[in-house]
Amino acid sequence: MRPAVVTRNYQRLRHHPASVWRRLIFVILGAALMAFNINTFVHAGGILPGGFTGVALLTRDIAAKYADLAIPFSPIYYLLNAAPAVLAFCFIGRRFTLYSVLMILLTGVFTDAMPPMFTRYLQLHDTLLSAVFGGLVNALAICACLSVGATSGGTDFIAIYAAEKFHRNAWNYIFVGNCAVLAVAGYLFTLEQALYSIIFQYIGTLALNGLCKEYQQCTLLIVTAKPEEIYALIRDELHHGATALTGVGLHAKSEKTLLYSVVDTDEAPALMAAIREIDPAAFVNVWRTDHVYGNFYHRPKD
């Protein structure tokens, strides 16, 4: 098949433009799930989520316990997210930030305004169940945003900025910050609350890694007789490089080329379909990649 045809097919498979309505629906769904989770599993178990959501809830609890002040969740949440949102708007992407800000605003409104009739039936008395299912729902909410090019805000802004600008994984630093918040909660309230919150975060992280492929990479080993065409596709459409090794296919006794390349995991399905169109006989082995060091291209946010 001609490269121009393959390129058009790749664009059709990989670059389906997410409509404004689709992005809005997923952002609203993510905010509703986040607020629902805060008012049910998180509230029932006395759990602190990670990031600025946990800081906002901790601040609210401290004001209620030590100053007898009933402060709404949303003002604290908005204040904490203000500076990271400006950073994201200037350095990551404008539409990405605007949809993320919408997610933050709706989460605050839904959390403070959600009627009790929607939440009272899930006020579990088992803290472990609250931690497990709360972590799952939290992961679903974040995944809904990431799937349409947005985020739940807060420390996610900081982590994405560090990953794109410095090519450095910031999630370990975010985890240390979350542990500091939990340490304060354990000191001011109970150690049990902090330990259950760790379970909540661990379950949420596992679910998020399994559900959402954004910001993950995979390694492709491609055995093909048409390396130049496939490399041109990887280079022109994904802006990634590749390394070619020449060998002999022992079964057919014919010369083959092994292309080694690392791509984003969410790019792989469309790329595989395009490779099949170039070379139906290509053999591709896909590996999960935990870490990438070096000059790896990250797609800019819109």
Image (cartoon, grey):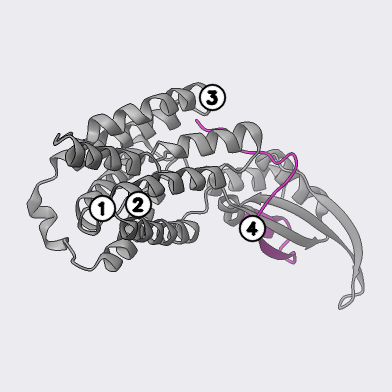
According to the picture, the residue beneath numbered tag 4 turns out to be 272
Magenta extent: 273-302
How many C-alpha atoms fall within 10 Å of the one at disc 1: few (<14), some, or many (≥20)?
Answer: many
Q: State the CA–CA distance, disc 2 to disc 1.
A: 21 Å
Q: Earlier in the sequence, mark 2 or mark 4?
A: 2
Judge whether residue 147 can be spotted in this image.
no
Q: Dot 4 lies on which element?
A: helix
According to the picture, the residue beneath numbered tag 3 turns out to be 91
Judge whether residue 169 can be spotted in this image.
yes
Q: Amino acid at mark 4?
A: Met
Closer to the eye: label 1 or 4: 1
Q: State the CA–CA distance, disc 3 to disc 2.
A: 36 Å
Residue 54 in percent (x, y) is at: 34, 44
Is there CB contact under 8 Å for labels 1 and 3? no
Q: Amino acid at mark 2?
A: Gly
**Side (left or right) of 270 relative to 157:** right
According to the picture, the residue beneath numbered tag 1 turns out to be 37
Q: Earlier in the sequence, mark 3 or mark 2?
A: 3
Q: Amino acid at mark 3?
A: Phe
How many C-alpha atoms fall within 10 Å of the one at disc 2: few (<14), some, or many (≥20)?
Answer: some
Q: Nearer the viewer, residue 238 or 146?
A: 146
User: Which disc is residue 186 wearing?
Assistant: 2
Residue 296 in percent (x, y) is at: 70, 41
Task: Give the residue at x 30% y 29%.
Answer: 78
Task: Give the residue at x 51% y 46%.
Answer: 176
In the current view of this chain or complex, which residue is farthest to the bottom?
A: 251
